[in-house]
Amino acid sequence: MSKVLLCSADELTPGSLKKVQNEVVGDLCVYNLDGEYYATLDMCTHATASLAEGFIEDDLITCPVHWGQFNIKTGEAVAFPCEKHLRTFKIVVENGEVFADLESPSPEAVEANIES
């Protein structure tokens, strides 16, 4: 497992998100949805835009540029113009810290986003 620290568990309140720089896979976005943590690539698959600058509604992240949406848990592109799924990462919480496993997709990931 190749895990990277994203944040402390108490750093993100429910409904919030944060961009985390990563040189291995590209910048990540970590989300707190009702006390559960999720991580995706930060870059929208439609255009050059940071999802960390977007907003969360239920379990969706809305891109701040063209208003496309992704399901945070699965990475599925659910609103046009986004059509390519978003890469997700398995989360591990240990000793109050939130990590992303860069080698594993989230358990809820849609099959199409498992590719690197």
Image (spheres, rainbow, N blue to C red):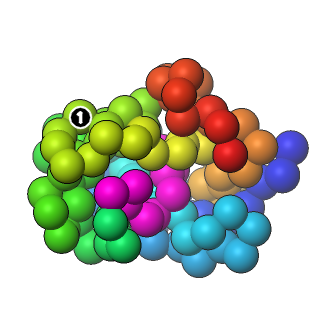
Observer-nearest of 94 and 109: 109
| Left or right of 26 on screen, residue 42 | left
Magenta residues, start to end: 37-46
| Left or right of 53 on screen, residue 94 | right
Mark yes or no: residue 55 visible. Answer: no
Q: Say which residue appears at 37% left-offset and 33% top-offset.
A: 76
Label 1 crowd (10 A; few <14 / some 14-19 / many >=20) = some
The residue wearing badge 1 is 78
Residue type (three-letter) at the residue carrying disc 1: Val
Observer-nearest of 7 and 84: 84
Give residue 54's quadrant in the image.
bottom left
Observer-nearest of 89 and 12: 89
Vertical relation: 74 (above or below) 26: above
| Left or right of 67 on screen, residue 108 | right
How far from the left and from the top, in percent, is residue 37? 47, 45
Q: Say which residue appears at 60% left-offset and 43% top-offset.
A: 89
Give residue 88's quadrant in the image.
top right
Observer-nearest of 35 and 79: 79
Secondary element under disc 1, as helix, strand or loop, is strand
Give residue 104's quadrant in the image.
top right
How far from the left and from the top, in percent, is residue 15? 25, 53
> Is 109 one of the magenta-colored residues?
no
How far from the left and from the top, in percent, is residue 79? 17, 40
Vertical relation: 110 (above or below) 49: above
Q: Say which residue appears at 36% left-offset and 73% top-offset.
A: 48
